[in-house]
Image: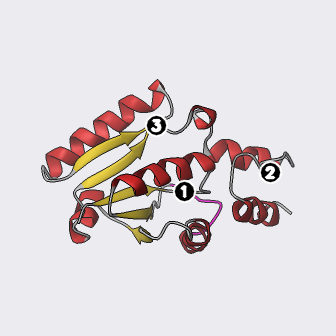
Protein backbone atom coordinates (compact mmCIF):
# COMPACT_ATOMS: atom_id res chain seq x y z
CA UNK A 1 0.00 0.00 0.00
CA UNK A 2 1.39 3.39 -1.02
CA UNK A 3 0.84 5.95 1.73
CA UNK A 4 1.55 9.67 1.70
CA UNK A 5 1.31 12.47 4.23
CA UNK A 6 0.24 16.04 3.47
CA UNK A 7 1.34 18.19 6.43
CA UNK A 8 0.43 21.77 7.17
CA UNK A 9 -1.24 24.16 9.54
CA UNK A 10 -4.42 24.40 7.42
CA UNK A 11 -5.58 27.51 9.31
CA UNK A 12 -7.90 27.40 7.42
CA UNK A 13 -7.87 24.88 4.60
CA UNK A 14 -8.34 26.55 1.21
CA UNK A 15 -9.43 25.36 -2.20
CA UNK A 16 -5.75 25.34 -3.14
CA UNK A 17 -4.99 22.88 -0.33
CA UNK A 18 -7.92 20.75 -1.42
CA UNK A 19 -6.79 20.75 -5.02
CA UNK A 20 -3.36 19.41 -3.99
CA UNK A 21 -5.02 16.89 -1.66
CA UNK A 22 -7.36 15.60 -4.37
CA UNK A 23 -4.39 15.14 -6.71
CA UNK A 24 -2.49 13.25 -4.00
CA UNK A 25 -5.53 11.06 -3.28
CA UNK A 26 -5.51 9.94 -6.92
CA UNK A 27 -1.80 9.07 -6.77
CA UNK A 28 -1.64 7.23 -3.43
CA UNK A 29 -3.69 4.50 -1.77
CA UNK A 30 -3.94 6.41 1.49
CA UNK A 31 -3.21 10.06 2.29
CA UNK A 32 -2.90 11.46 5.79
CA UNK A 33 -3.66 15.16 6.13
CA UNK A 34 -1.50 15.97 9.14
CA UNK A 35 -2.25 19.14 11.06
CA UNK A 36 0.93 20.35 12.71
CA UNK A 37 0.92 21.58 16.29
CA UNK A 38 3.06 24.69 16.07
CA UNK A 39 3.62 26.57 19.31
CA UNK A 40 5.23 29.45 17.39
CA UNK A 41 2.04 30.17 15.44
CA UNK A 42 -1.10 31.52 17.07
CA UNK A 43 -3.76 30.02 14.86
CA UNK A 44 -7.17 31.52 14.33
CA UNK A 45 -8.69 28.06 14.72
CA UNK A 46 -7.56 25.56 17.32
CA UNK A 47 -6.01 22.34 16.06
CA UNK A 48 -9.20 20.52 17.08
CA UNK A 49 -11.36 22.99 15.13
CA UNK A 50 -9.13 22.62 12.08
CA UNK A 51 -9.36 18.83 12.31
CA UNK A 52 -13.16 18.95 12.51
CA UNK A 53 -13.38 21.35 9.55
CA UNK A 54 -10.99 19.24 7.50
CA UNK A 55 -12.91 16.04 8.27
CA UNK A 56 -16.11 17.70 7.09
CA UNK A 57 -14.39 19.01 3.97
CA UNK A 58 -12.75 15.72 2.88
CA UNK A 59 -15.75 13.43 3.49
CA UNK A 60 -15.92 12.65 -0.22
CA UNK A 61 -12.33 11.36 -0.34
CA UNK A 62 -12.50 7.83 1.11
CA UNK A 63 -8.74 7.28 1.16
CA UNK A 64 -7.95 10.48 3.10
CA UNK A 65 -7.45 10.50 6.89
CA UNK A 66 -7.18 13.65 9.01
CA UNK A 67 -4.61 13.48 11.81
CA UNK A 68 -2.61 15.76 14.11
CA UNK A 69 1.04 15.64 15.09
CA UNK A 70 3.81 17.42 16.90
CA UNK A 71 7.51 16.80 16.72
CA UNK A 72 9.46 15.87 13.63
CA UNK A 73 7.41 15.17 10.53
CA UNK A 74 9.67 12.33 9.43
CA UNK A 75 9.18 10.60 12.79
CA UNK A 76 5.42 10.91 12.46
CA UNK A 77 5.56 9.71 8.84
CA UNK A 78 7.57 6.68 9.92
CA UNK A 79 5.00 5.88 12.64
CA UNK A 80 2.29 5.79 9.95
CA UNK A 81 4.42 3.71 7.56
CA UNK A 82 4.43 6.61 5.09
CA UNK A 83 7.19 6.98 2.52
CA UNK A 84 6.10 10.19 0.75
CA UNK A 85 5.56 13.74 1.98
CA UNK A 86 3.27 15.83 -0.22
CA UNK A 87 3.99 19.53 -0.48
CA UNK A 88 2.20 22.12 -2.58
CA UNK A 89 4.13 24.66 -4.60
CA UNK A 90 2.25 27.78 -5.59
CA UNK A 91 5.05 29.95 -6.89
CA UNK A 92 8.80 30.14 -7.21
CA UNK A 93 8.87 31.91 -3.85
CA UNK A 94 7.67 28.66 -2.19
CA UNK A 95 10.37 26.59 -3.83
CA UNK A 96 13.46 27.61 -1.84
CA UNK A 97 11.89 26.93 1.56
CA UNK A 98 10.26 23.68 0.42
CA UNK A 99 13.47 22.51 -1.25
CA UNK A 100 15.44 23.06 1.99
CA UNK A 101 12.79 21.21 4.00
CA UNK A 102 12.78 18.30 1.56
CA UNK A 103 16.55 17.97 1.75
CA UNK A 104 16.53 18.14 5.55
CA UNK A 105 13.77 15.53 5.78
CA UNK A 106 15.75 13.27 3.43
CA UNK A 107 18.83 13.74 5.63
CA UNK A 108 16.81 12.84 8.75
CA UNK A 109 15.22 9.80 7.09
CA UNK A 110 16.43 8.66 3.69
CA UNK A 111 13.38 6.42 3.32
CA UNK A 112 10.98 9.35 3.10
CA UNK A 113 10.76 11.25 -0.18
CA UNK A 114 9.03 14.56 -0.90
CA UNK A 115 6.69 15.00 -3.86
CA UNK A 116 5.79 18.52 -4.96
CA UNK A 117 2.36 19.09 -6.47
CA UNK A 118 1.23 22.35 -8.00
CA UNK A 119 -2.36 23.48 -7.58
CA UNK A 120 -4.45 24.64 -10.50
CA UNK A 121 -3.37 28.02 -11.82
CA UNK A 122 -6.47 29.66 -10.34
CA UNK A 123 -5.16 28.86 -6.83
CA UNK A 124 -1.52 29.87 -7.18
CA UNK A 125 -2.06 33.23 -5.44
CA UNK A 126 -4.20 31.76 -2.66
CA UNK A 127 -3.04 31.47 0.95
CA UNK A 128 -4.72 30.93 4.30
CA UNK A 129 -3.35 34.27 5.47
CA UNK A 130 -4.98 36.15 2.58
CA UNK A 131 -8.29 34.34 3.05
CA UNK A 132 -8.35 35.25 6.75
CA UNK A 133 -7.57 38.88 5.95
CA UNK A 134 -10.36 39.12 3.36
CA UNK A 135 -12.82 37.40 5.71
CA UNK A 136 -11.88 39.69 8.61
CA UNK A 137 -12.56 42.73 6.42
CA UNK A 138 -15.96 41.34 5.39
CA UNK A 139 -15.01 40.33 1.85
CA UNK A 140 -16.48 37.45 -0.14
CA UNK A 141 -14.29 34.34 0.26
CA UNK A 142 -16.69 31.85 -1.34
CA UNK A 143 -14.39 31.30 -4.35
CA UNK A 144 -11.40 30.52 -2.11
CA UNK A 145 -12.65 28.05 0.51
CA UNK A 146 -15.30 25.34 0.91
CA UNK A 147 -18.67 26.43 2.32
CA UNK A 148 -17.97 24.97 5.79
CA UNK A 149 -14.80 27.03 6.05
CA UNK A 150 -16.53 30.21 4.86
CA UNK A 151 -19.22 29.73 7.55
CA UNK A 152 -16.61 29.07 10.24
CA UNK A 153 -14.63 32.18 9.28
CA UNK A 154 -17.78 34.29 9.28
CA UNK A 155 -18.57 33.06 12.81
CA UNK A 156 -15.01 33.78 14.01
CA UNK A 157 -15.12 37.35 12.74
CA UNK A 158 -18.74 38.11 13.71
Q: Which mark is residue 118?
A: 3
In this view, the residue farthest toward the left is: 110
Q: Split into 4 quadrants, where in the image is the N terminus?
A: bottom left
- Residue indicated by mark 2: 136
Q: Which mark is residue 37?
A: none
Which color mode does the image show? secondary structure
86 or 9, which lies in front? 86
Q: Residues within 10 Å of mark 3 (few under 14, many from 20)?
A: some
Q: Quick check: 111 above or below 55? A: above
Q: State the separation of the CA atoms marked 1 and 3.
A: 17 Å
Q: Secondary structure at mark 1?
A: loop
Residue 47: percent from the left, percent from the top? 54, 69
- When asked about the image quadrant of residue 82, the answer is bottom left
Q: Earlier in the sequence, mark 1 or mark 3?
A: 1
Q: Magenta region: which residues?
A: 41-46
Q: Split into 4 quadrants, where in the image is the C terminus?
A: bottom right
Q: Which mark is residue 10?
A: 1
Q: Secondary structure at mark 2?
A: helix
Residue 29: percent from the left, percent from the top? 32, 63
Who's the residue at 74% across and 61% down the image? 147
Q: Earlier in the sequence, mark 3 or mark 2?
A: 3
Q: Is residue 43 magenta?
A: yes
93 or 33, which lies in front? 33
Who's the residue at 27% across and 41% down the image? 102
Amino acid sequence: MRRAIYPGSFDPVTNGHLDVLERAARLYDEVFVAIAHNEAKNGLFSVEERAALLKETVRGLPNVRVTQFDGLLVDYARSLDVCVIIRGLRAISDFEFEFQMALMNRKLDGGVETTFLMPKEEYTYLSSRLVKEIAKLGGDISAFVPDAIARALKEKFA
